[in-house]
Image (spheres, rainbow, N blue to C red):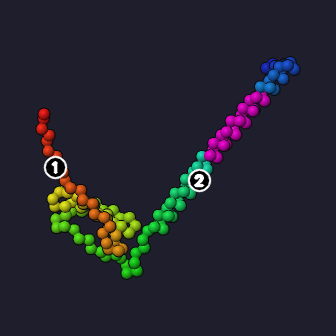
Amino acid sequence: MPEDQKQNYSDADRAAIERIRRKMMRLMMIALIITIALIAAVMAALIYKTTRSSKAAAESAAITTPLPASGGIEATLPLPAGARILSHSLSGKFVSLLVQLPDGSSELLVYDYQAQTPVAQLRMPVEVNRPQEMQ
């Protein structure tokens, strides 16, 4: 600083400036500690979430059914003549089929393909909506 811009402070002014500087330093330290604590909490949450999802993936991998040594599974599921398969889903050893029957109703078939047995058969009949008479 050039000599003409230097300010001469009294001892009382210097003490007041030092108190203000200490308060500012204390406030900065508190803000820094809070920031570090929040960053640590976010990191802990991320680590927790990633380890939990890998455990869930390992559990689901353990549930999968291995294919037999013969190379595949063959099974026959009887369907009514004229039925259409609308959708299907595979989970573990179960396969589910949503079938539209010739009369327009739907049926959900759940089949255990390892044991080659039906597990559930849910029929969803078509209801005809009649117009209600006005009274």
Relative to 113, 79 lies left or right? left
Which structural element holds mark 1?
loop
Give amino acid for label 1. Val
The quarter of the picture where the C terminus appears is top left
Q: Of callouts 2 and 1, which one flags the residue occurring earlier in the amino acid sequence?
A: 2
User: Taking the image as drawn, is residue 87 in sight?
Assistant: yes
Image location of residue 23, percent across then percent down: 76, 29
Residue bounds of the magenta highlight: 21-41
Q: CA distance from mark 2 to mark 1?
A: 55 Å
Give amino acid for label 2. Ile
The quarter of the picture where the N terminus appears is top right
Relative to 1, 50 lies left or right? left
Relative to 82, 31 lies left or right? right
Asked which quadrant contains residue 30, the reply is top right
**Mark 2 nearby-residue class (10 Å; few <14, some 14–19, many ≥20):** few
Which of the pair 119/71 is nearer the observer? 119
Mark 2 sits on what residue? 47
Which residue reaches farthest front? 135
Magenta: main secondary structure equals: helix
Asked which quadrant contains residue 19, the reply is top right
Which of the pair 29/9 is nearer the observer? 29
Instruction: Residue at 38%, 69% (x, y): give it.
Output: 93
Relative to 2, 69 lies left or right? left
Which structural element holds mark 2?
helix
Mark 1 sits on what residue? 128
Image location of residue 109, percent across then percent down: 28, 64
User: Taking the image as drawn, is residue 3 in sight?
Assistant: no
